[in-house]
Image (spheres, coloured by chain):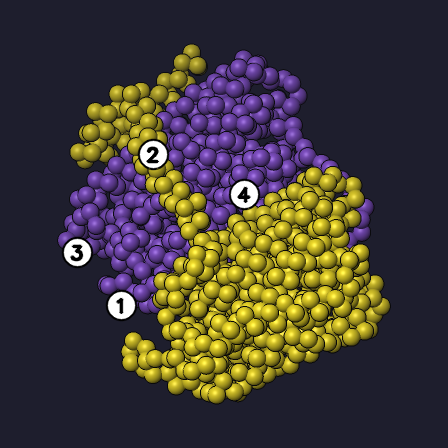
Amino acid sequence: MIGLLVAAPLLGAALLLLGGRRLDRVGHWLGLAASAASLVFALVLFTDLLGKDGEERSLHQHLFSWVPVADFRADVAFQLDQLSMTFVLLITSVGTLIHLYSVGYMEHDERRRRFFGYLNLFLAAMLLLVLADNYLLLYVGWEGVGLASYLLIGFWQHKPSAATAAKKAFVVNRVGDVGLSLAILLMFTTFGSFSFTHVFAGVDGASEATLTGIGLMLLLAACGKSAQVPLQSWLGDAMEGPTPVSALIHAATMVTAGVYLVTRSGVVFDAAPDAQTVVITVGAVTLLFGAIVGCAKDDIKKALAGSTMSQIGYMMLAAGLGPLGYVFAIMHLVTHGFFKAGLFLGAGSVMHGMNDEVDMRRYGGLRKHMPITFATFGLAYLAIIGFPYLSGFFSKDEIIYAGFAKGGNEGWLLGGVMLLGAALTAYYMTRIMLMTFFGEKRWQPDEAGHEPHPHESPLVMTVPMLILAVGSVAAGFVFDSGERFVKWLEPVTGLAHGDSPVSHGEVSIAATVVMLLGVGGAYLQYGRREVPAVAPAGRLLTRAARRDLLQDDFNHVAFVQTGNYLTRGLVYLDHKLVDGMVNGTAAAFGGLSGRLRRVQNGFARSYAVSMFGGTALLVAATLLMRAV
Amino acid sequence: MSFPLLTATAAVPAIGAVATAAVPAARRTGAKWLALAFSLVTVGFAAAVLLRFDTGSGADRFQLTESHSWIEDFGVRYELGVDGIGATMIALTAVLVPFLIGAGWNDADPVEGEPQATRRWRPTQGFFALILMVEAMVVLSFAATDVFLFYLFFEAMLIPMYFLIGGFGDRAGEQGEEGQARQRSYAAVKFLLYNLVGGLVMLAAVIGLYAQTADQLDAGTFSLQAILEARASGDLDFSTGVERWLFLGFFFAFAIKAPLWPLHTWLPNAMGEATAPVAVLITAIVDKVGTFAMLRFCLGLFPEASDWATPVILVLSLVSILYGALVALGQRDMKRLIAYASISHFGFIVLGVFAMTSQGQGGATLYMINHGIATAALLLVAGFLIARRGSRLIGDYGGVQKTAPVLAGTFLVGGLATLSLPGTGPFVSEFLVLVGTFSRHQAVGIIACTGIVLAALYVLVLYQRTMTGPVRAGLEKLPDLRVRELAVVTPLIGLLLFLGVYPKPLTEIVNPAVEHTLSDVHQTDPEPQIDVSEVEAAE
């Protein structure tokens, strides 16, 4: 049954990608059906798990032995517990909604069948990632989603920018993958195994240094996949992909895989406090980094991408807090999955009606033209800024509270950073909201002279948006009432309460106050005044933030340029020095240079024959000598 | 006396070569079909080798053995036999050759303006006959258990290879017909010289080895099994100095063939100038004899010297991995790019061999197989592309996926396998090599790991520049893959995926051979620090 979860979309992908043009007309429905089938399997398994007691909610399925070489035993085996079940439900439900949305969004694309094939491939890989019972199989899913992401970011390959962004995403992720490889290698040399069960059982006996090493390497992997500092630079460019892709892969599911990895490896991190400190730091830095970038972007998708980074920063930070935060990291991950997917689908709907314009300075006043999009986007907006009693309010406040509960100066620092982040979130989201849906219309004819005619999207697109809006509104409340979510996950992740200097209520009030400050700030700047159609020069920080806080400039100088010089230098050396030296030695030894010249005059064959003849003679002579 | 299966596996392509060469000039197409038929029959024999190979725990190390005296005065015998490694390598060779023939179907057809085929000059027949000849020699190299016999085939395959490289090239015309011929001839001679020098040094070592056995045993012998037994029993004992010199003699030849940095520079020339199928023949099949021979002869015959040389060889492998990848990034010619990528991959193979662990050597063996198939897939598609446009320069392409999506798609899959994407065969072998290396030499393993980023770069940059972006002028009408080309590429891709998902049939054959090799060098796998074996796997 668990295998079927993965098999359905995998089969869908195979059919769609190999089926050829015959399937062009039904391909999208086939893709949707595969995804929906997965969702149905997931729901069945979910009710199955609910029927069991908390501690026994785990299913295991061993398919076959994959790579057995001496003590190295890798299996294809699945494990379904509360943590993976949570992810499976998120992936299949949001995934199916986005498949449905894509039917409309990609309607006019001649390669729609292939698009659905890639989406199915992504689902299969992502499910494999969260269902694997060992790190090596997880790695397969891990790179599998990377591949799907590569294919989908670069889906419009004829655009050089898309092709470049796709390559960048893959390569940066590969840097993270080195971390995952090394973590697995360390596990193997330490425990002789890399299955979750074995590794976690062995943690007690391992030295802290080793565990810290494993933890940091896992974190490197998580940074790559989840776009955390210092491997964050690919996410903004990844917005080159079609918007449903941004919603599914680069907001709701794949980019949260890093949080999954850290939470799944909680046992390791709990025993390696130094590694945890680094996780917290990465999370805290990224949540501010992403928020600052999000404040400065005029491209609606890139602003949302900054927001995604920032929100994942919250999750990462929470996961770094250990049992204090695991549950809430995952809870925020799920609620974020709903409202961020909703936001991206809303953005896609806006672009759909605006001739694919992404510059918010060319929007304005769209609420009148796209009422459903406005309503669903608005609800998701309220959810993400933490408006009381919507999803984000519950999940984010719990994380901020957990930060304070860390205790001591550290607790105050973390709590403060996260409150600042909350203010920034409210600011940049309000900015997006105001620039897009309020104010006067600012759109102009595009280069070809087409005036955009903003219109509401078809049902097939708005229905998924409506459903996600419901999730954005209600998920937090449903999870929080009776501590359902906490009780569900606790058996896997553990739970601690810590010693917070402030109460839950105080945190909520503080969070609401900073949220209002952020909203107010944005309103003063973008609501009261007309938004200029061309961005003002801005101050130093704004300019830096528009350039993603110089991340690419740094990478360019540090890696790209250095790499180019190195490569060019080596190519030259290889030709002149290595080749020349070996040739030179050969020539010197045999006085061959003269002959080489002869060779180039066309005596190559005779030369070869004589050379081989010589060897043969030599062999014969030597053997004869021995015999005598 | 059972049926000499190994001899037969080599004899089929050898006979096929003669038969193909004898086809009259006018029956060009018939010659191709004949060559293909013989190569397919060889696959059948190779399959029989695999099926007859016993992987049970008490099975002999060398199986399907044949032994006949040949030159009695010098103890040279015609001795064949395979362990699991040899058997899989023979299978790889046999499986790849039909695809090479299919891919090179039109590569040796006469072009207008060229002198027409005559009774004495029949290039098409020659091309396919030479490929089959190489196949026969390679199979015998993998099967020979007599050191001298091995040497003979190791050297003899240079002759057909030389003519394949020098005689047939791409019709890629940026340098004109004459310039191209000059380049080709240079590449062929360079290939020959390098390998001959290696062979000569090895010959000296072979003779030295014989002298040692003649001194210490009743009679001199080249028999691998006899020498291994005598060494194990203590009847044959090399002094440290002798063993090291002999080891170096063998290793030098294999390191040229493999090729290992800094002896690699013949490979980009040869692979660049040869037609794509011949380039695959070089890197996927012929070069594997080098790494295979390291496992069989260097480690088996000279365990102490192997141990002694390991640190230097590990460093050379690391240099190969990183250097090959970086130089690949800087190439403008796509075949040379793939050649440098191969150098990087050979670094991994040698690393695995000398990591002296089950995972390292098992991984290295799988790596030889997977690299062979992955490179074949990538390079053959590159060859199809080059044949369409008449240029090897990456800069002459762009936007191919728009006009030839299937070609671009297969190229991407070949590329992804080359960068060892999980789910494809090369991932399994590369990871095993890394595990095997890391568990004994942590720092080396860490550095080798960075190779996976570079691999992603050179593959994806190549794909981006050739396949994506706006369609370049002159490529608007580029035809997509034809049926013949699809028939070549699809099974290779299928194999890559299969070996990525279910490599167990291979590991089962290879594992016992690796155990034997490890015990030759008196090594055991490092133990994990913590024993968790008693923990029950989750139900």
Q: Which residue is at a point 39% across and 68% down the rendered structure image? A: A535
Q: Residues within 10 Å of mark 1 (few under 14, many from 20)?
A: few
Q: Residues within 10 Å of mark 4 (few under 14, many from 20)?
A: many
Please name the residue that numbered disc 1 is placed on: B477
The secondary structure type at the circle numbered 1 is loop
Please name the residue that numbered disc 3 is placed on: B112
Q: Which of the numbered marks, if any, corresponds to residue A421?
A: none
Q: Are marks 2 and 1 in contact (CB under 8 Å)?
A: no
Q: Work out whether disc 3 and disc 2 sit on a shared chain.
A: no
Q: Marks 1 and 3, Cα distance to the nearest angstrom?
A: 23 Å
Q: Are marks 1 and 3 in contact (CB under 8 Å)?
A: no
Q: Marks 3 and 4, Cα distance to the nearest angstrom?
A: 50 Å
Q: Nearer the viewer, mark 3 or mark 2?
A: 2
**Mark 1 or mark 3: whose residue is earlier in sequence:** 3
The colour one sees for chain B in the rendered image is purple
Label 4 resides on the chain identified as B
Residue A187 visible from this viewpoint? no
Label 2 resides on the chain identified as A
Please name the residue that numbered disc 4 is placed on: B449
Chain coloured yellow: A
Q: Which residue is at a point 21% across and 51% down the rendered structure image? A: B173
Q: Which residue is at a point 55% across and 28% down the rendered structure image? A: B310
Please determine whether, in this image, residue B501 is positioned above or below residue B84: below
Q: Which of the numbered marks, if any, corresponds to residue A573?
A: 2
Please determine whether, in this image, residue A557 is positioned above or below residue A88: above
**Mark 1 or mark 4: whose residue is earlier in sequence:** 4
The residue type indicated by label 3 comes to Glu
The residue type indicated by label 4 comes to Cys
Image quarter of residue B60: top right
